[in-house]
Image: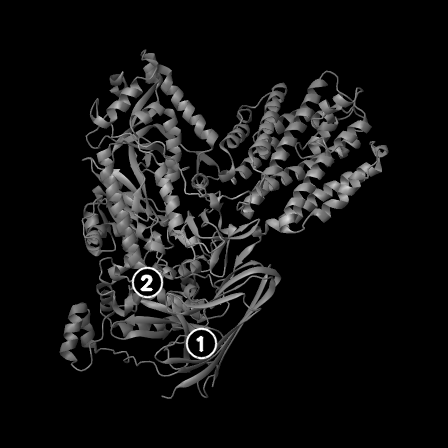
């Protein structure tokens, strides 16, 4: 079996192969894994792939690509086969990375401190001053513990001789650790037995190190502030790695905030919560540093926190990584590191960098052109967003052009030795040919070699740098690609660091440092933005629910009367039109079908809105909730389309899912103020929807039977249990308007709203009860004798309540969501 | 020469059409203390009263007043008033135009130049060629506390400009003495470019100024910085004031009644020399130094972030009166 598995897997001479020592012969640390893999039953591997793909889609693991015009998220692609590293090999990498992080931190401490390295020429001054990442305002700032480089990542590649090289350093706000964590969750679930048999080292302790160290480096809270508040600062949902930000925030237990959630007062950073301002002690930043403060750094930044730089200078907040740490990502620095290691650490650099020359040195420039075939020329800063040029690929003319371009600004470029990186197996769906030859089914999936690179991570703990035992293995797009980049659509792998002895599996992030006195009740910090997102999630959820139900009733009506059309249009169709679900009532059948199943029409659009609102709440949403929503929004009906009768079964399915979603809200959320905002959103939306529905019913629908209305409002059962007659106006309007016990009545919405608002007003002062009270009174005053379609009182109450819903929404926005106020930057005006 | 004293007023007013709920500001409005400049009295008034306020030196040594207003307001007024005494700056040797014969020799290169000069002119130190200034900064970046080294690189407002480098290259012939070359560059900018308020905005780039050949003092300073740094020469942006009233019989100078801007360029031989390309002259006792930095963004007199405010109306009043 093993032979068959490895049969078609080629090992070239020019690259190191991670799995095989030579053709057909696995390296010792892969042996057990491969035997177990080969022993799996036929269809099992194929199932493995499908299972993983489903899991990734449903968990919404994504990587956004800026360039995508639709702003769509691309599902994260994970290969099920992990990259295996032996314990001894890992030790080499681990100590090399810890040393390198320490060295780079010392370099940062010097260039933002005494600048001895620049004075002596150990680092050419232009390498630092000429780099856009050097932030003058940070000069002289020493962070807590001297930790500039809180998190560090390095991209490693393995040379043909088996040794590891550092290709580049990530010192700004390195991404990938969260994806590595997610890969681990997915892959370890696919191979649970192998994972435990091979003694794979766990990642949790690394993340505990991140969390505990942030709490350690944060300034001590003042008396009465409780434990330090740490936040994760993200540029927002449109960032390519936003998924990771949300994941990490949830995993580490830090609020996920955007710049607009924070503000500066008296030299301290504060988080705007619905409970007021809360002092922030540390910021784990995933936003580039020059965007962090429009006041002192880039004035065109719409993302930052005005005054953050000054807080950092005053030491009132710990920011990891320190502002300005991106400067040492410069490729120009790589060539100087061996000497700096000797000078600053008194020891040789353990992990070499890929040979790199800064072309700002005239000698290096001349030399590079002599050996261009073996080099790639790339810009010094990633922010230049310019591709690397492989010397060997260039024609004579292209070389001349490139040389002229580089010669004009040589200090912006480096030449780097081109390394033939190692390859590792990926699992691929096989070709039909193998089937034709009568190969066993397991070979439909085959192992194929792909170039790989490894990103590893370290964090500054009080005991020195701790390296994550594992990492993000990135896979080139096709067989011989030399560029490994997530933005270009590469896949990734989990990385298994094997251990000689059983690992302590009982450790998890939950073995925490929270003490009894740290327990907080329901008054958790709810950022205002999160409150607003919850509010809109509630509204959109209800909006989807009503759309689904109206369409279902309308389509059912059309189908019932297909043989014998009734006079005039059914009220449900008019309602669908009034709610904007269909544009046109002339050909209702077609319009309703489109509204329900077309990917660009009403229902799909509303579900997308709901998904987007949910996406902004990723850090607060349970995985189950998220999965249900993703299944709903990506239902195959939107791709395949369907016929009218079948659309009905889709809408039934959708109603069920919507009920599941509201079940989570009812059953799975603590009754915190966050839940209250969500509930107010739902009630307001349902209130205004009910008002519109009843307006249509009592006017255009006055002459119709009332079954559709009870059906739409899910009140058929209620009615039948109380009245034995066919639906009549008086009891129907009573149930839908005045009955406070019916969750689909107007009175029920109003009562709930008044309770939630009263609760919020207790802690925040009055804002909406004055608006709600008169409408509530008018509803209460509605007499049974008024309950008929021609009643002016009913029409008036409906109108008043619909307006009231809008007014309450406005008051709430004004009171709690003020952070959204427009901001402008006045700088650069003399 | 006797010290000159000036009273400087610099008032910035904002009027907002909608209330501003939050405002954070950085004021760089404190004249620097320099060997030739004393600040005798100084006040900075902020209206409405700032809720918080703190003075701190920035990384260039300028005094910055950080202040914040956290209550709703519809206007902001920041008024600086000071009394400054300016004495003569250290003298810069008059640009030495070497004899023709010597100039020929200079073209042989930097090394030859200093040799030949030490042979022919024993008394005065040999003027450093501009290439020698560049090499000196590269070889010994530590001089003057690394400031020249940090002022030789592109910045957001003065990025590398091939156009500026090309424009300047006429003045930077091989081996030409630094002072001579930079002085000529100043003259050419003055002659080739039209001073025209309103022709540019704060976001007009160096390349656009080069193309349209018009601008104000800030544009000319940025252009000159691009020219010098494009040749690897250190230079910084200086913000300040120029005496308003022309002395009797003297021509009226441009760039008055507003903040002024000029350039300080560095040579190991002369230190920082202040060139004013707008008026084609070296800074003298009429120039009051406020702040300096790598470009205008570093020295914006009032820079802030506000929430709300609607449309804004701003006006600035500057006056410099001999005391």
Residue A132 can be seen in this image: no
How far from the left and from the top, in percent, is residue A157?
26, 38
How far from the left and from the top, in percent, is residue A537?
58, 38
Query: Taking A781 as reference, is A752 left or right?
Result: left
Which is nearer the eye, A362 or B104? A362
| Foreground disc of the pair 1, 2 | 1
Which is nearer the eye, B323 or A757? A757
Q: Are marks 1 and 2 on the same chain?
A: yes
Q: On the image, which quarter does residue A201 sit in? A: top left
Taking B149 as reference, is A368 above or below it? above
Q: Residue at x 15, y 74 (%)?
A: B116
Q: CA distance from mark 1 to mark 2?
A: 28 Å
The outermost residue toward the right is A785
Query: Taking A289 as reference, is A12 left or right?
Result: left
Mark 2 is surrounded, within 10 Å at the Cα level, by few (under 14), some (14 to 19) or many (20 or more) other residues, namely many
Query: Taking A682 as reference, is A284 left or right?
Result: left
Q: Dot 2 falls on which chain?
A: B
Residue tagged by mark 2?
B165
Q: Residue at x 57, y 44 (%)?
A: A531
Q: Quadrant of the N terminus of chain A?
A: top left
Residue contact at pointers 1 and 2, CB within 8 angstroms: no
Tag 1's secondary structure? Answer: strand
Which colour style is shown? one colour
Taking A596 as reference, is B207 above or below it? below
Tag 2's secondary structure? Answer: helix
Q: Dot 1 falls on which chain?
A: B
Q: On the image, which quarter does residue A652 sit in? A: top right
Q: Earlier in the sequence, mark 1 or mark 2?
A: 2
How far from the left and from the top, in percent, is residue A117?
24, 59
Residue tagged by mark 1?
B241
């Amino acid at each position: 079996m093993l032979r068959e598995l490895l049969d078609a897997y080629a090992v070239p001479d020019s690259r190191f192969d991670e799995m095989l020592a030579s053709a057909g012969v696995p390296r010792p640390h892969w042996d057990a894994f491969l035997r177990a893999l080969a022993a799996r039953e036929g269809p099992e591997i194929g199932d493995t792939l499908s299972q993983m793909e489903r899991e990734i889609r449903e968990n919404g693991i994504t990587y956004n690509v800026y360039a995508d015009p639709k702003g769509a998220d691309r599902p994260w692609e994970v290969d099920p086969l992990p990259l295996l590293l032996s314990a001894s090999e890992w030790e080499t990498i681990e100590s090399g990375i810890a040393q390198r992080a320490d060295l780079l931190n010392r370099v940062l401490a010097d260039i933002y401190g005494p600048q001895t390295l620049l004075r002596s020429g150990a680092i050419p001054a232009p390498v630092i001053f000429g780099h856009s990442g050097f932030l003058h305002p940070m000069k002289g700032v020493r962070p807590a513990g001297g930790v500039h480089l809180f998190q560090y990542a390095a991209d490693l590649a393995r040379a043909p001789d088996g040794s590891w090289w550092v290709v580049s350093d990530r010192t700004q706000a390195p991404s990938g650790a969260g994806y590595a964590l997610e890969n681990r969750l997915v892959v370890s679930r696919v191979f649970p037995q192998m994972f435990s048999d091979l003694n794979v080292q766990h990642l949790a302790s690394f993340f505990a190190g991140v969390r505990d160290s942030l709490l350690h480096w944060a300034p001590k809270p003042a008396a009465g502030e409780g434990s330090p508040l740490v936040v994760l600062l993200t540029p927002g949902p449109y960032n390519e790695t936003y998924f990771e930000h949300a994941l990490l925030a949830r995993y580490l237990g830090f609020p996920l905030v955007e710049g607009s959630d924070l503000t500066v007062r008296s030299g301290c950073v504060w988080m705007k919560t619905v409970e007021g301002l809360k002092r922030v002690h540390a910021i784990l930043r995933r936003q580039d540093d020059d965007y962090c403060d429009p006041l002192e750094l880039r004035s065109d930044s719409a993302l930052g926190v005005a005054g953050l730089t000054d807080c950092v200078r005053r030491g009132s907040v710990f920011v990891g990584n320190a502002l300005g740490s991106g400067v040492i990502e410069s490729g120009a620095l790589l060539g100087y590191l061996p000497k700096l290691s000797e000078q600053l650490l008194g020891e040789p650099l353990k992990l070499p960098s890929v040979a790199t020359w800064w072309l700002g040195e005239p000698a290096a420039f001349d030399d590079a052109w002599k050996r261009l075939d073996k080099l790639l020329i790339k810009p010094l800063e990633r922010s230049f967003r310019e591709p690397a040029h492989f010397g060997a690929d260039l024609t004579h003319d292209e070389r001349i052009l490139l040389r002229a371009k580089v010669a004009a600004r040589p200090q912006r470029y480096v030449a780097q030795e081109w390394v033939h990186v190692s390859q590792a197996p990926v699992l691929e769906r096989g070709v039909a040919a193998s089937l034709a030859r009568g190969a066993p089914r397991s070979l439909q999936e085959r192992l194929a070699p792909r170039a790989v690179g490894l990103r590893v991570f370290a964090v500054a703990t009080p005991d020195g740098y701790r390296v994550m035992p594992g990492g993000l293995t990135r896979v080139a797009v096709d067989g011989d690609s030399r560029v490994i980049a997530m933005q270009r659509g590469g896949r990734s792998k989990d990385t298994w660091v094997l251990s000689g002895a059983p690992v302590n599996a009982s450790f998890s992030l939950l073995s925490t440092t929270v003490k009894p006195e740290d327990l907080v009740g329901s008054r958790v910090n709810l950022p205002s933005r999160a409150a607003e997102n919850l509010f809109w999630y509630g509204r959109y959820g209800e909006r989807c629910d009503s759309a689904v139900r109206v369409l279902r009733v309308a389509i059912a009506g059309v189908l019932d009367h297909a043989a014998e059309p009734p006079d005039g249009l059914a009220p449900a169709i008019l309602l669908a039109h009034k709610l904007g679900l269909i544009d046109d009532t002339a050909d209702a059948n077609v319009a309703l079908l489109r509204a329900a199943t077309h990917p660009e029409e009403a229902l799909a659009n509303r579900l997308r809105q709901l998904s987007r609102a949910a996406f902004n709440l990723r850090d607060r949403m349970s995985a189950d909730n998220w999965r249900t929503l993703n299944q709903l929004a990506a239902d195959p009906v939107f791709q395949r389309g369907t016929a009218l009768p079948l659309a009905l079964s889709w809408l039934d399915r959708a109603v069920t899912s919507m009920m599941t979603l509201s079940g989570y809200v009812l059953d799975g959320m603590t009754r915190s103020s966050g839940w209250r905002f969500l509930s107010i959103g739902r009630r307001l939306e349902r209130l205004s929807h009910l008002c519109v529905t009843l307006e249509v019913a009592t006017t255009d629908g006055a002459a119709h039977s009332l079954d559709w209305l009870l059906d739409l409002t899910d009140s058929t059962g209620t009615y039948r249990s109380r009245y034995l007659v066919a639906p009549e106006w008086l009891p129907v309007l009573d149930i839908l308007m005045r009955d406070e016990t019916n969750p689909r009545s107007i009175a029920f919405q109003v009562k709930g709203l008044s309770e939630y608002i009263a609760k919020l007003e207790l802690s925040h002062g009055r804002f909406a009860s004055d608006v709600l009270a008169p409408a509530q009174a008018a509803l209460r005053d509605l007499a049974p004798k008024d309950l008929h379609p021609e009643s002016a009182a009913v029409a008036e109450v409906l109108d008043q309540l619909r307006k009231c819903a809008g007014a309450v929404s406005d008051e709430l926005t004004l009171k709690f969501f003020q952070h959204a106020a427009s901001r402008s930057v006045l700088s650069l005006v003399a | 020469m006797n010290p000159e004293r000036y009273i400087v007023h610099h008032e910035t007013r904002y009027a907002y059409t909608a209330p501003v709920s939050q405002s954070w500001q950085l004021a760089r409005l404190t004249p620097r203390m320099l060997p030739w400049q004393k600040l005798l009295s100084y006040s900075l008034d902020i209206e409405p009263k700032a809720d918080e306020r703190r003075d701190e030196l920035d990384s260039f040594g300028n005094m910055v007043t950080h202040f914040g207003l956290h209550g709703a307001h519809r206007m902001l007024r920041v008024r600086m008033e000071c009394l400054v005494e300016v004495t003569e700056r250290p003298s810069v040797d008059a640009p030495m135009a070497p004899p023709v014969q010597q100039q020929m020799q200079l073209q042989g290169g930097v090394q030859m130049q200093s040799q030949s000069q030490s042979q022919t002119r024993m008394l005065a130190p040999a003027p450093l060629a501009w290439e020698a200034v560049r090499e000196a900064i590269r070889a010994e970046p530590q001089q003057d506390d690394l400031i020249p080294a940090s002022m030789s690189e592109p910045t957001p407002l003065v990025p590398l400009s091939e156009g500026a480098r090309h424009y300047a290259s006429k003045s930077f012939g091989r081996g030409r003495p630094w002072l001579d070359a930079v002085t000529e560059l100043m003259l050419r900018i003055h002659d080739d470019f039209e001073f025209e308020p309103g022709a540019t905005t704060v976001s007009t780039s160096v390349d656009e100024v080069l193309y349209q050949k018009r601008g104000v003092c800030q544009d000319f300073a940025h252009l000159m910085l691009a020219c010098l740094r494009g040749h690897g020469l250190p230079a910084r942006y200086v913000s300040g004031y120029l005496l308003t009233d022309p002395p009797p019989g003297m021509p009226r100078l441009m760039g008055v009644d507003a903040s002024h801007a000029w350039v300080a360029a560095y040579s190991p031989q002369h230190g920082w020399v202040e060139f004013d390309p707008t008026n084609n002259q070296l800074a003298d006792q009429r120039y009051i130094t406020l702040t300096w930095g790598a470009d205008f963004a570093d020295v914006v007199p009032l820079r802030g972030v506000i929430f709300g405010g609607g449309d804004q109306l701003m006006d600035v009043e500057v006056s410099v009166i001999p005391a």
